[in-house]
Amino acid sequence: MITYQIISKTGGRPVNEDCTGMHQVGEGYGFFLADGLGGHGKGDIASRTAVEQAILQFEAGNCSEETLKNIFEAGEAAILERQEAERASQSMKTTLTALLLDENQIRWGHVGDSRIYYFQNHSLVGRTMDHSVPQMLAAAGEIREKDIRHHPDRNRLLRVMGVEWERPAYQLAEPVSRRGSQSFLLCSDGFWELVNEKEMTAALKRASDVGQWLEKMTALVEKHGAGTNMDNYSAVAVWVRD
């Protein structure tokens, strides 16, 4: 059984440049989250375009690796086309996360610093690695992993959609089989910067359903962000219970 809950909030910003989406085709589910960059009404166009294309590609395909690649490549092409039409090449970019599930396998991919967290039996297995300067510094051992959240260059991204790619900028994870109790969290940086992995796991262990899990994490985001000019924050929580 697959259950899910989605939130997307403006925070302290005038416009919500995050976009979320979900689509079901038969036994297949697709979940998508994008965080637009650029401001002035352009970041939200980029994120919306990415999610719209993701849904179209998922509907036309299935939960295969090819479909996952098409989601990112079609989104990239559509954003570049929109940039040209609106003369907005510098201000219409976005991250994208995509999670595809069918009755047998689970696949995911990402570009940018929106994350996908993977939990098995209420324990964190891993997460996507940000395409950002702080993540690169952490990988090189120059800063600690936990320092990414508050690093002064945390918004400097190395890969996004909306920039011409010499080679694919997106990154695909190895697929996993559906088994036991699996939980996934897709979230923008405005969400994960304000709730850490230990808190996510504790909330998961205390939650009786997927909605309660997301509710507990969102409460922490809002608590930790109180009194600040919070970024947009969005998340898609997915439970797979077979």
Image (cartoon, rainbow, N blue to C red):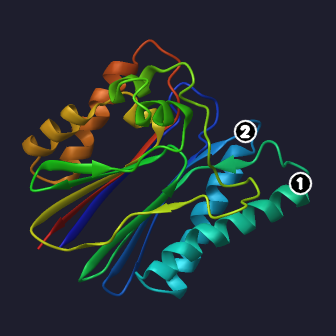
Instruction: Give the quadrant of residue 238.
Output: bottom left
Identify the residue at horizontal 72%, vertical 54% (top origin). Answer: 162
- The image shows residue 230 at horizontal and vertical percentages of 50, 24
Identify the residue at horizontal 54%, vertical 24% (top origin). Answer: 12
**Residue bearing mark 2:** 38
Q: Which mark is residue 86?
A: 1
- The image shows residue 226 at horizontal and vertical percentages of 39, 16
Residue 26 vs 220, above or below: the answer is: below
Q: Earlier in the sequence, mark 2 or mark 1?
A: 2
Question: Can residue 119 be spotted in the picture?
Answer: yes
Instruction: Give the quadrant of residue 195.
Output: top left
Instruction: Give the quadrant of residue 194.
Output: top left
Residue 203 vs 161, above or below: the answer is: above
Q: Which mark is residue 147?
A: none
State the SS at label 1: helix
- The image shows residue 63 at horizontal and vertical percentages of 40, 81
Q: How many marks?
A: 2
